């Protein structure tokens, strides 16, 4: 199975959302990382045929997607960031409705619906009205809808948003399990969620691919640039002004500060192993801070 994205470009007026995006995707998990406005949503909407590219083409298993038409769209499961749901439906009714829209037979739907409900931990909410679900439960329902029908390509926009830590781990493990025979594309701001499951990270910056590599390769690029320093509270403000501080924690007798810096930022600073979030902050420090506000 192979999905080729060749020279995909898209502009909104004078604003370039994507510029000459190229990738060849095979079964596994690919993470799209980048600040708001980097082109992640535009790319996902082009792949799902919700948006037309200005240039470029999509090829699936050697055939142009535009020639495949419905046959290509049937191979895609899409979970948008802000999905629309019908609050008066029960969870069961909603999944049956989605199964019919996807063209599943009654027999296939009866087989799949219990399985996807169990996978996203919604079995006990089968008769609950969708409008009565919490935000996290609606998120899991939309994931269930995306995987219904066993699509070859699964595109997930912020799949773990609103989930508690236990649910995030369960959803993360489920995605990892089904990705053995699917092409899974995940866009997320929860960097830690994809550090352990994505085989490849595609970093987007202003509509262009900034880097594309495995998490371990990206993390190795900032080896020796992440520091921990134990300091007094009165010194923290000055460190924030002069260095890129990524975390502050109050200990019993001091303040522990995590810092990104090419050189030793404090006399007592010691190197610490970097993470993918450290890499993201190293590349997009200012943009990341704005997104959290």
Image (tube, rainbow, N blue to C red):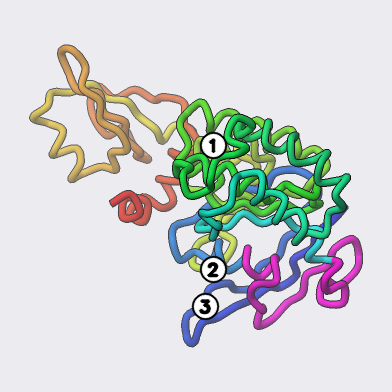
For label 2, the residue is: 207
Decide if residue 195 is in sight here.
yes
Label 1 – label 3 distance at C-alpha? 29 Å
> In terms of sequence position, does the residue under pointer 2 or pointer 3 come before the other?
3
Q: How many marks?
A: 3
- Confirm or deny contact between disc 2 and disc 3 (CB under 8 A): yes
Rendered residue at 67%/36% (across/down) = 117
Q: Position of residue 157 (x, y in %)?
A: 57, 53
Question: Which contiguous range is marked in magenta?
Answer: 44-71
- Provide the residue designation for mark 1: 193
In this picture, residue 173 sits left or right of residue 247: right
Q: Earlier in the sequence, mark 1 or mark 3?
A: 3
Q: Residue placed at 68% from the left, 49% from the top?
A: 95
Percent from the top left, x then y, of residue 31? 61, 48
Tell me the element at label 1.
Answer: helix
Q: Report which residue position mark 3 lands on.
A: 16
Residue 65 within the magenta-colored segment of the rendering? yes
């Amino acid at each position: 199975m192979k999905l080729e994205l060749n020279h995909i470009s898209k502009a909104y007026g004078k604003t370039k959302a994507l510029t000459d995006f190229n990738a060849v995707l095979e079964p596994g998990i690919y993470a799209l990382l980048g600040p708001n406005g980097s082109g992640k949503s535009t790319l996902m909407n082009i792949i799902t045929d919700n948006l037309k590219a200005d240039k470029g083409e999509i090829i699936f298993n050697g055939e142009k997607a535009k020639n495949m038409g419905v046959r290509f769209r049937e191979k895609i499961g899409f979970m948008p960031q802000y999905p629309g749901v019908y609050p008066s439906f029960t969870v069961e009714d909603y999944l049956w409705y989605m199964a019919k829209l996807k063209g599943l037979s009654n027999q296939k739907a009866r087989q799949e619906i219990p399985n996807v409900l169990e996978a996203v931990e919604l079995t006990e909410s089968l008769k609950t009205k969708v409008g009565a679900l919490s935000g996290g439960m609606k998120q899991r329902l939309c994931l269930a809808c995306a995987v219904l029908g066993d699509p070859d390509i699964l595109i997930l926009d912020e799949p773990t948003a609103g989930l508690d830590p236990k649910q995030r781990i369960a959803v993360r493990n489920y995605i990892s399990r089904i990705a053995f025979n699917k092409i899974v594309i995940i866009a997320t701001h929860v960097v830690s969620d994809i550090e352990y499951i994505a085989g490849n990270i595609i970093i987007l910056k202003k509509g262009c691919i900034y880097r594309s590599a495995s998490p371990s390769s990206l993390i190795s690029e900032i080896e020796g640039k992440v520091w921990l320093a134990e300091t007094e509270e009165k010194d923290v403000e000055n460190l924030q002004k002069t260095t890129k501080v990524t975390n502050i924690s109050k200990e019993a007798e001091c303040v522990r500060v995590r810092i990104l810096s090419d050189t030793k930022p404090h006399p007592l600073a010691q190197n610490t192993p970097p993470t993918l979030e450290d890499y993201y902050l190293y590349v997009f420090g200012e943009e990341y801070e704005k997104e959290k506000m």
